[in-house]
Image (tube, rainbow, N blue to C red):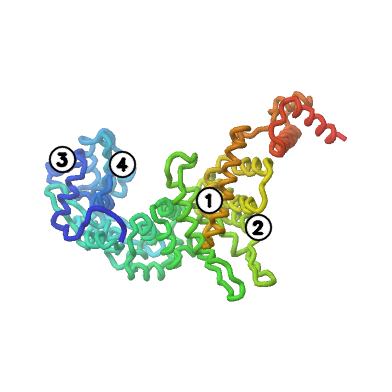
Amino acid sequence: MSQREPDLSGMSERAAAHVIGRVPKAAQQLAEAFAAEGAELALVGGPVRDLLLGRAVEDLDLATNLPPDQTIAILERWASKTWDAGRAFGTVAGRRGKTVVEITTYRTEEYQPDSRKPDVTYGDSLEGDLSRRDFSINAMAVLLAPELRFTDPFGGLADLAAGLLRTPATPTQSFSDDPLRMMRAARFAAQLGFDVDEAAVAAMTELAERIKIVSAERVQAELVKLMLAPQPRRGLELMVYTGLAQQILPELPALQLEIDEHHHHKDVYEHTLTVVDQAIALETGPEGAVPGPDLVLRLAALMHDIGKPATRRFEPGGGVSFHHHEVVGAKLTTKRLRALRFDTATIKDVSRLVELHLRFHGYGEGEWTDSAVRRYVTDAGPLLERLHRLTRADCTTRNRRRAERLAFAYDDLERRVAALSAQEELRAIRPDLNGDQIMAVLGIKPGRDVGRAYQYLLERRINEGPLGEEAATQALKAWWAEQQG
């Protein structure tokens, strides 16, 4: 059972008072406006759950028996701003101060087998509306108008206290109607630390392939929420166990490599989950200042070894190798994240970290030259802090002496990076001459040769440190003469 507050045992009679005491006054004033019209208004779903868990709630989900046209008329008298882009689906929204509300007319839904988009019709009861929710913990409500009443027709409060995810309808019907609910089960397991009801797990296993009818964008949104949750491992393990990961992220279950009795190597799947946990423990923001969660780091930890299944080789004498799995893994990462419609920057950064995650190995076996340290920093670029954390997280050995040796080596590398950075502004490393200076020295116009000359000077800068303008000019002239010869 996860850590949460307050203790909800035996609290059903006090639940409404517990929630209403935490509802923003602006929302209570809106409820009074609905009551004046003889209409119902209820706080529903996630906000009720979170308020019962003692969490702060900013945006409020509300439901009413009024149709959207009447709802917007009341809302406009209360809100400083309204919008109704979802009016066709029965939803209007508004803001007053910091309080944002989204009000949906009671609905019933009917799903077609080949689509998760329901045919929506307006309903006439709060209980009917709650029956269409994904899980019982999201199917609770507090009626705010015309009276104050806690409604929990599917035992959500008891499930909340037990740390259990259970569907209001049968899980087979619920997940078949909207397969994205299976991803939401994994996400809530990761966010709340809850267990999933056995019947729901069985239904997820049976219906995992139906996730294919959900758009990649919606799947990605749930995966991101899962990865940013406090306990991603719980959700990832559920996805693998039920077969959902095979449909969405097949590279993850593929890490469950068979371990031949004569070819021992660590369990890559378990190792990967441990690296995710350890990366989170080392987590800071992208610039090393603001605490996480850091999606790029977490995704890189998840994907860092996905090239191993394709590169596994059994060596003579019983060894196992995964040569160049970081290069293969980077390509597979790019392909998978593109399929999941991640943005270009995230794809680029995660794939680059996967490609670089082995670069450190070997440092402890022989001290790097200054030029090797410069190249390490230059290749990592703005990802250096994340690469530090990913590399440290990748140490999951149970051999204490080996772990201490690796930690010492990486501490030493970080000291070397810091020392060189102080001397040379290492993270902003540039050639001693810029493009304009290169063109002036060589008497050439913008074009390919300028880029070649720039790269030559950059390599000299990395290998030798700062040359100074005069020495760089002489080196450039000598290089250019060789090119012309």
Q: Is residue 395 visible?
A: yes
Q: Earlier in the sequence, mark 2 or mark 4?
A: 4
Residue marked by disc 1? 390
Residue marked by disc 4? 84
Horizontal and vertical percent position of residue 265: 58, 67
In this rendering, the answer to whether 246 lies above or below 369 is below
Q: Distance between the residues labelled 1 and 4?
A: 44 Å
**In terms of secondary structure, where does tag 2 sit?**
loop
Q: Quadrant of the N terminus?
A: bottom left
Q: In which quarter of the image is residue 370?
A: top right
Q: How far apart are marks 3 and 4 (CA)?
A: 19 Å
Question: For the residues carrying marks 3 and 1, which lies nearer the camera in this image?
Answer: 1
Residue marked by disc 3? 33
In this rendering, the answer to whether 248 lies above or below 466 is below
**In terms of secondary structure, where does tag 4 sit?**
loop
Q: What's the amino acid at mark 3?
A: Ala
Horizontal and vertical percent position of residue 296: 50, 48
Horizontal and vertical percent position of residue 38: 12, 46
Residue marked by disc 2? 324
Q: How far apart are marks 3 and 1 (CA)?
A: 54 Å
Q: Residue at x 47, y 54 (%)?
A: 278
Dot 2: within a 10 Å radius of its alpha carbon, few (fewer than 14), some, or many (20 or more) residues? Answer: some
Whether tag 2 and tag 4 are in contact, CB under 8 A, the answer is: no
Whether tag 3 and tag 1 are in contact, CB under 8 A, the answer is: no
Question: For the residues carrying marks 2 and 3, which lies nearer the camera in this image?
Answer: 2
Q: Which residue is drawn at 45% across and 39% down?
A: 289
Q: Earlier in the sequence, mark 3 or mark 1?
A: 3
Q: What's the amino acid at mark 2?
A: His
